[in-house]
Image (cartoon, helix red, strand yellow):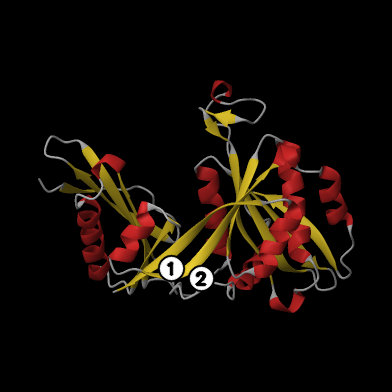
Amino acid sequence: MPARITRLTDPAVTPSSHRLAWLASATDGTPLGSAFLRLFTTKGQTHLAELDIAVHPAERRQGVGTTLLDAAVVTARGERRRSVIAQAAQGSPGDAFLAARGFRKVLTLTYARLELVETDPGHLSRIVQQPRPGHHLTAWTGVVPPELALTYAASRRAMDDMPMGETDYGTVVWDVDRVVAAAEAIAKRGDTLYTVAAVHSSSGTIVGFSELVLPGDGNSDSDSDRNGDTINGRRREGQHYGTAVLPEHRGLGLGLWMKAKAILHARGLDSGLALLTDTAENNTPMRRVNDALGYRPTHTALEYQLDL
């Protein structure tokens, strides 16, 4: 029997996108799989959609994933999207599924993990304390302070040339409103955004940044392990969102400097955390930074793209 597809309402609206969702179920109502299609809505990315499909292992190879994919692609075309991107771990069923259905590989990502309990705070402190002539560090939690907002938003162009392979990613346009909205969205879901910025001392402008999102503690003390190990049985993990330096200030070790300070901050809050990061395989400078800080690769993921 073919799967029954039900379109759902997904409340996951962000300042830069919204999601559509579908549920695949059997005739008796048993869930078989789901699909989420994120439609980017900001200038420079309105051509793009991001797809996430999941099918229960016992229900694979019965057309469930294909039916969900067809529903998402029809909608993406109706929304006048030019490209749909999706990601899968290398060698996984999702990898084979996307490759067999017209998606092409456009980017390879290396995922890495850092257990804070295994880090050497002395090593991190030495990196942070090493002078970078003409620059100094500043940091904040949550929304960027008003006096730094304009220069911080302007510094986001440092991400414009990050390696993206052949991905039709478009251009992300940042202004103060978007910077503030992104931080507020993270806080709303219960997590904390910690940002380290490199400042050009003579001009007072921000020339680089490193963002680290740290997990919240749940709704009550009873939900969390006070040693930072788990919440509701789940491993506590932080996630690096972006680290970038303006082209005219690269080659000075600012990326390593900022990221080391962020890690020290996280370790001081909770040494039981693990921090996660992902980096384009061909982004050699950032992979070297991660190696120097003790990150260890965990797996490789492939970014796929379907051209509509």
Residue 298 percent across, percent down from the top left: 58, 50
Residue 176 percent across, percent down from the top left: 58, 64
When the figure is inspected, residue 55 is found, relative to residue 18, above or below; the finding is above
Of residues 239 and 150, the one nearer the viewer is 239
Using the numbered discs, state the Cα–Cα distance from disc 2 to disc 1 in whole angstroms.
8 Å
Three-letter code for the amino acid on which mark 1 is drawn: Thr
Residue ID for mark 2:
172
Of residues 29 and 186, the one nearer the viewer is 29
Residue 133 percent across, percent down from the top left: 89, 69
Which dot marks residue 167?
none
Three-letter code for the amino acid on which mark 2 is drawn: Val
When the figure is inspected, residue 152 is found, relative to residue 53, above or below; the finding is below
Query: Which residue lies at the image location 70% right of the left edge and 35% below the top edge?
Result: 270
- The total of numbered circles placed on residues is 2
Q: Marks 1 and 2: in contact by CB < 8 Å?
A: yes
Image quarter hosting the N terminus: top left
**Local secondary structure at mark 2:** loop
Q: Badge 2 local density, few (<14 within 10 Å), some, or many (20+)?
A: some
Residue 71 percent across, percent down from the top left: 21, 59
Query: Which residue lies at the image location 56% right of the left edge and 68% below the top edge?
Result: 175
Q: Is 184 on the left-hand or right-hand side of 257?
A: left
Residue ID for mark 1:
42
When the figure is inspected, residue 221 is found, relative to residue 215, above or below; the finding is above
